[in-house]
Amino acid sequence: MCYAPLDSAEMTPEPACPRCSKVLSPEDTIERDGDRVAHVDCLQPRRLTREERVLHFQYCWDHGVVECVPCSRIFRQEELLASLFGDGMDRCPKCRRDLTDGIRAHPKTRERARREGDER
Ligand SMILES: [Zn+2]
Ligand SMILES: [Zn+2]
């Protein structure tokens, strides 16, 4: 580990996870931990949250949510091997590629979730 000098650290404050002391990135799944923010899962910071999964099952059960580019296949949420490998990642059933980012980027889910959120 190499630490930046204090000056530059103050210039660009990067919030770090208090549990694993890694810098939090926008792609990480985070939660509030007291007055700080921490990874939901430090080992797999980009894992989908339970809420995100629920949203996908609710809104996207009838169409593909993610494409595995190397396999040129589009998968539905239920086709992904989220639990088979026991690591909580959403993987391509064919090549076991981590498709978490693709699922997260699936625009329909966010759109619909946001719209319903506005109506509430
Ligand atoms: Zn962490
Ligand atoms: Zn694949």
Image: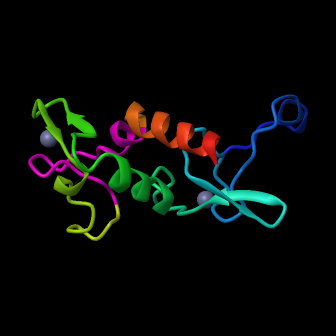
Q: Position of residue 91 (x, y in %)?
A: 24, 51
- Residue at the spot x=84%, y=61% of the render? 35
In this rendering, the count of numbered labels is 0
- Rendered-image quarter of ligand 1: bottom right
Residue 111 in the image: x percent, y percent? Answer: 48, 33
Rendered image coloring scheme: rainbow
Q: Is residue 70 left or right of residue 61?
A: left
Q: Residue at x 13, y 52 (%)?
A: 93
Q: Is residue 27 visible?
A: no
* Left or right of residue 35: residue 97: left
Where residue 49 appears, x then y in whole percent?
49, 58
The answer to whether residue 29 is magenta is: no
Reply above or below: 49 against 75.
below
Q: Which residue lies at the image location 16% right of the left edge and 54% below the top edge?
A: 79
Residue 69, image x, y percentages: 18, 29
Query: What secondary structure do most residues of the magenta stretch adopt?
Result: loop
Residue at the spot 8% in from the left edge and 48% down from the top edge: 94
Res 13 quadrant in image:
top right
Q: Is residue 113 left or right of residue 66?
A: right
Asked if residue 72 can be seen in this view, the reply is yes
Q: Is residue 21 above or below residue 64?
A: below
Q: Is residue 115 above or below residue 47?
A: above
Magenta residues?
Answer: 89-104
Q: Is residue 96 magenta?
A: yes
- Which of these two is toward me, 9 or 107? 107
